Image: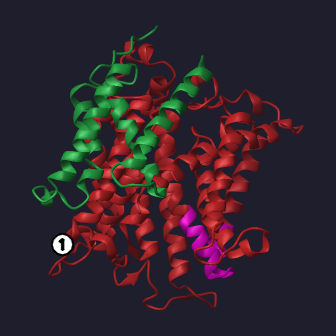
Amino acid sequence: MSATAWAVAGGLAVVAGVFLVGYPNPGLSISAEAVALRALPAAIIGGLDSTSGAVVGGLLVGLAETLAGGYQNELLFLGRGFDQVAPYLLMLIVLIIRPAGLFGTREAARV
Amino acid sequence: MSSLPRPPARRVVRDAALVAVAVVALALPLYVGGFWLQLGSFAFAAAVGAIGLAILFGRVGQLSLAHAFFLAVGAYGYIWLASPSGDDSWGLGLPSLLALALAAVLASLAGWAFSPIAARLRGLYLGVASLALVFLGQHILFTAEPLTGGYNGRPVPTLAVGGVQLSGSQPELVAFNVLIGRDERLWYLTLAVLVVAAVFAVAVLRGRVGRAFVAIRDAEVPAATLGVNLGRYRAMAFALSSGYAGLAGALLALLFQRVVPDYWGLLLSLQYLAMVVIGGSASIGGAILGATFVSSLPILLQRYGDAIPGVSTALGSGLGPAVVAQFCYGALIIAVLVAEPRGLVALLGRIRRRRPGTPGADRRAEPEPALSMRSQQ
């Protein structure tokens, strides 16, 4: 089961990588590895144990990043390059309100 | 975590070894050169930070990737508190020793402020949530220029007590015909801070608080049933760990003399995690051992790397000392996790126990690993 999960995860990561070739800049650079780190907030925002949550989380992360980038001039008081950290800020806010993510289930304690 | 009374013979040997180590550590600056003293100072400073992470990760079982952030809070906090205020830079101009202590307090408060998240989350959730602090922190370091100096960083004010510089070379001091310069003073300073930090950590872990930490790690629900306030103790551990990180960060700043934002990134957090895992995640001695190893390896490779085939110390080459060092401790982490999840310290203990003539040694309560292959399932 664990091997299957790894295989599916790897396959989906490849799909994400293929999309990255076209956007935001054509081609890939070494710094594209930072994108992988932004998949973590996406999964956490949605809730780690919820796959549909991951989709919502991914959309929210993408929106936060693109909006922060697009309105960069209006958000200058937050500093240049704020779009890179907007997903993390969003994740912290979500975690304060819902510690298990938006669609995650609270872990039951086993005694 | 109380250990059984040691047999007297063993205690004598242990005390003698401690005295020998103390004498060597105090006398070493009189005999060895600046390179080795700097190596030692960096290892001592890193060890202070690693002790903090060992408490949080090894004893309470909370995974934190935010250590680099709190190191940065300590480093920049010291600069802000100790620097005089300038035209385009903020500073309070406090006495530097007070600033050093307050830098640790500041980092601890920052850790406390994170407790709405740190006290409620655990496992991977906390790991990733703390990751956010590293990225947000670096963003602040790059953009809050009056406070941090922005991309170019800020110079670090010298630590001085009563006109005697502890991180500089003024006024000139001579002991046993040896000039006690900057390297020697920093060696003594970092060593003294490490000793105090380690003794304090041991005292905390042996007491009521330390037992509560371990109880939370090993059995959360029973611990809560016995009256351990989970949230409060988790927040306390996080603040304590952050305070240690802040102190280490301020020491590192003193060693660097100028700090730049690039240094306090995710890689630094991972290095501290490597120190704690390699040394033995639940033990103070292990944290010091791991910190010495991880912080010394790149510096040693930089100096002696040319003697190893395939490693190049030339600037900009592919397989530089830093990269090779990363490979080394990456491989070592895997080896430790597979062979001995309790780290190098447990490995040393195992060797000692195999030796005849040390009865009762194996009866000692061993710290449980916070990270083992089995608990990952």
Q: Is residue B41 magenta?
A: yes
* Total tally of numbered discs in the picture: 1
Q: Is the magenta stretch mostly helix, strand or loop?
A: helix
Task: Report whether A85 appears left or right of B307.
Answer: left
Chain at tag 1: B
Q: In which quarter of the image is the N terminus of chain B?
A: top right
**Residue, x 67% and y 67% (percent of image)?**
B23
Q: Can residue B139 be seen in this view?
A: yes
Snapshot colouring: by chain
Could you tell me residue B369's position as x and y percent?
60, 31
Q: Can residue A91 be seen in this view?
A: no
**Residue, x 33% and y 35% (percent of image)?**
B118
- Residue, far top: A111
Identify which residue, B77 or B363, lies in the foreground: B77
Chain B palette colour: red
Give the chain ID for the green colour. A
- The boundaries of the magenta stretch are B24-43
Mark 1 belongs to which amino acid?
Answer: Trp
Identify which residue, A11 or B262, lies in the foreground: A11
